[in-house]
Amino acid sequence: MADEHQPVLLEAALAALAVRPDGTYIDATFGRGGHTAAMLDRLGPAGRVIAFDQDPDAERHARALAAADERLVFVRASFADMADVLAQHDIRDVDGVLFDLGVSSPQFDVAERGFSFRHAGPLDMRMNPDAGAPLSEWLATASHGEIAHVIKMLGEEPMAGRIAGAILEAREAGRLTDTAALAALIKSAIPARVAAGKRVHPATRTFQAFRMHINDELGALDAGLAAGLSALAPGGRLVVISFHSLEDRRVKRFFRHQARPPQPELPMAPAVEPALRLIGKPVTASESELAANPRARSAIMRAAERTTAEEVAP
């Protein structure tokens, strides 16, 4: 990997997908197209990639790539809507589905998107700026309890109550103006002795929590994983790269449930066959990738292969 805009765990993901030249693959998170381009490089004339992304900037990159390579089909949609999109186009029995979760580096670099506390930008954080309500709208009416709950549950931030209180005070005083102001007040709400022990900026966990809440990222992940599994042909691979412990736990639980389904208690009831076979152990970034790409430090990849059995009910 040359820089932080390159896909994380690229070679590991391609190896886990076991790309076949004539296969059909889904890139559930196109981003800037690094994984899609690598898949296309390994496909023959009969192969194709169906890429999803709800981000308008991702769409521009994808349309340009699709114009140069007819093997790419791009869909401007969240992977949460994958099941409906695939059904509408009668797409089934694909050979692999890849999820690269979270926010791409270019999104952090654009202040107007409101994802980063490094630059002053609007309080937005929507993956799809054409749908849903921005962070500013939610913060304008949310209660102390609602804000603290989101920060604690999705950011795993122990100072959630103090931060929520600081946000309400800033809201009443009209100081909740942009991402820089939000980051500053979060930092001021955390005691210096606590902040000194953090390896990252004190606002990191809260910004992460707000982004996940505004985009319902965990709910979308549940829907996307179920759709990806249903789309796979027997022998097809499901590969997920996550950057957050809550996401990885969700993926791990889904994989384990489908690979080691609970069995019926009645002695005469037929056994429930697994719909997935786990492939290897979870993969993390190599030392060389960590040196080249700081974003890779929290990445973890899990992979599984579809069996001939039906999906296991939740």
Image (cartoon, grey):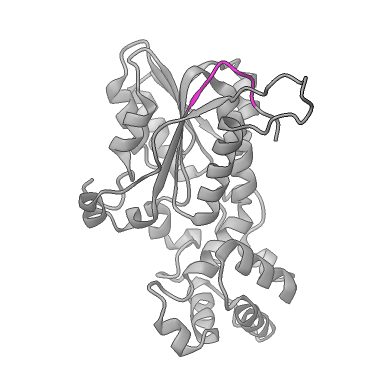
Q: Is residue 208 above or below residue 200?
A: above
Residue at position x 33%, y 31% in the image: 14
Q: Bounds of the magenta span?
A: 305-311
213 to 11, vertically: above or below: below
| Residue closer to the observer: 244 or 171 | 244
Q: Is residue 30 visible?
A: no
The single residue placed furthest to the front in the displayed view is 267
Residue situated in front as seen by the camera: 199 or 50: 199
Residue at (36, 30) in percent of width and height: 16
Indicate whether residue 306 is drawn in magenta. yes
User: Which of the image's four quarters has the N terminus?
Assistant: top left
Q: Is residue 27 visible?
A: yes
Q: Quadrant of the C terminus?
A: top right
Q: Position of residue 154 (x, y in %)?
A: 59, 61
Magenta residues: mostly which secondary structure? loop
Image coordinates for residue 31, horizontal then vertical, percent = 42, 42
